[in-house]
Image (tube, rainbow, N blue to C red):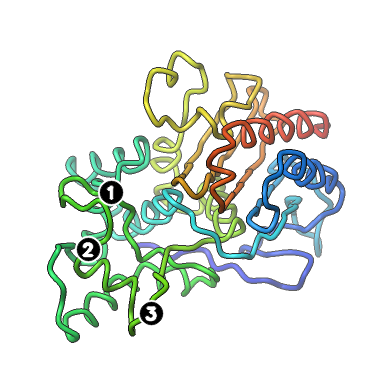
């Protein structure tokens, strides 16, 4: 077991992870304007868009209180959005916290969950973490309370380190081995607690996702190297173009002009949203950044060109900013 690096908001201008600072900085705010303008041009609903961008390049940002800082820009980065399969990134971190040395079978499930974004593997991992088990049977009130408390562990783990606006207690569907296309039994009950008609869904913010990727990148977890290995993507078309529902086509990776960059990502989509989150490092190591985009509307799902276009633009602008 290990402790998660605590972070807190010092004020409205920066976020601090112990002695590492993410600085809200206007020096590359024009990139934010370009993303927003592109969404407008494509008639995408701005109220459903969030993004976060962290410049990881050394010495790219002025010191804050004498400490190294990394420049940060964002748009609606604290609004909760449905993350789809990006939630699996958070389950990955908790899974490694509980079991730093997974056996061959659990390692297989972690690979499937992250590399293939497999819902069956994710279901098994969530059950393993929370000591719950999904079924089609409804639970009695007492058993449902226990089930809910156990699933809430996923949220509480991140809440204890000051992650806000987060719900990662719901599985992703369909789950073929359970013969569930949609939530049933206790999973359905969990979405309608206290008779709520509107379903309770997973939600994250682009800031949540960017900060977690930052911690993984910055080796703040003992298992960060293993996590990065699972997140690494080959951008050469021959590696992904024949794979259905791959993590590149229609997402950030497709827009990167240089296919030899180091690219680590976790995307997520449904018919009602399109999201991606990535760490990008150029071959010369001079340009490195984290980009998270959450488009929580069917218009973003339908527009398969928006994320690649944003990614290409951000890459080109970040290259020009590199000293």
Dot 1: what SS?
Answer: loop
- The CA distance from mark 3 to mark 2 is 16 Å
Q: Residue furthest left?
A: 137
Q: Which residue is mark 1?
A: 174
What residue is shown with label 2?
A: 184
Q: CA distance from mark 1 to mark 2?
A: 11 Å
Horizontal placement of 296 versus 136: left or right? right
Q: Position of residue 202 (x, y in %)?
A: 43, 63
Number of numbered discs on residues: 3
Instruction: Kindly report the distance in space between the C-alpha atoms of the residues bearing marks 1 and 3.
Output: 22 Å
How many other residues sit within 10 Å of disc 2, few (<14), some (14-19) or many (≥20)?
A: some
Q: Secondary structure at mark 2?
A: loop
Dot 3 or dot 2: first in sequence order is 2
In the rendered image, residue 11, in percent from the top left (x then y), is placed at 76, 73
Residue marked by disc 3: 196
Give neighbour class at mark 3: few <14, some 14-19, many 20+ (Cα, 10 Å).
Answer: few
Name which residue lies at 74% across and 54% down. 69
Apparent side of residue 142 relative to residue 258 in the rendered image (left or right): left
Query: Between residues 99 and 118, which one lies in front from this camera angle?
Result: 118
Give the mark, 1 or 2, whose residue is nearer the N terminus. 1
């Amino acid at each position: 077991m290990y402790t998660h690096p605590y972070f807190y908001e010092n004020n409205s201008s920066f976020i601090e992870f112990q002695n590492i600072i993410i600085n809200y900085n206007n020096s590359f705010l024009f990139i934010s304007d370009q993303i927003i303008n592109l969404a407008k041009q494509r008639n995408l609903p701005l109220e459903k868009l969030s993004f976060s961008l962290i410049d990881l390049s050394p010495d790219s940002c002025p010191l804050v209180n004498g400490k190294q800082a990394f420049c940060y820009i964002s748009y609606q980065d604290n609004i909760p959005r449905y993350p789809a399969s990006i939630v699996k990134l958070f389950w990955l971190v908790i899974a490694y916290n509980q079991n730093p040395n997974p056996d061959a079978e659990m390692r297989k499930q972690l690979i499937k969950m992250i590399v293939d974004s497999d819902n069956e593997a994710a279901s098994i991992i969530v059950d393993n973490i929370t000591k719950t088990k999904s079924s089609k049977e409804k639970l009695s009130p007492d058993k449902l309370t226990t089930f809910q408390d156990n699933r809430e562990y996923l949220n509480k783990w991140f809440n204890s380190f000051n992650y806000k606006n987060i719900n990662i207690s719901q599985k992703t569907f369909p789950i073929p081995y359970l013969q569930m296309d949609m939530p049933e039994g206790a999973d359905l009950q969990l979405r309608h607690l206290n008779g709520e008609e509107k379903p309770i869904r997973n939600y994250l913010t682009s800031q949540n996702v960017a900060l977690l990727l930052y911690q993984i990148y910055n080796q703040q977890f003992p298992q960060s190297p293993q996590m990065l290995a699972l997140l690494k993507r080959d951008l050469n078309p021959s590696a992904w173009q024949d794979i259905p529902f791959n993590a590149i086509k229609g997402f950030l990776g497709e827009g990167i002009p240089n296919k030899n960059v180091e690219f680590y990502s976790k995307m997520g989509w449904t018919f009602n949203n399109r999201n991606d989150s990535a760490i990008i490092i150029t071959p010369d190591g001079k340009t490195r950044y984290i980009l998270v985009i959450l488009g929580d509307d069917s218009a973003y799902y339908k527009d398969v060109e928006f994320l690649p276009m944003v990614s290409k633009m951000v890459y080109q602008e970040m290259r020009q900013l590199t000293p």
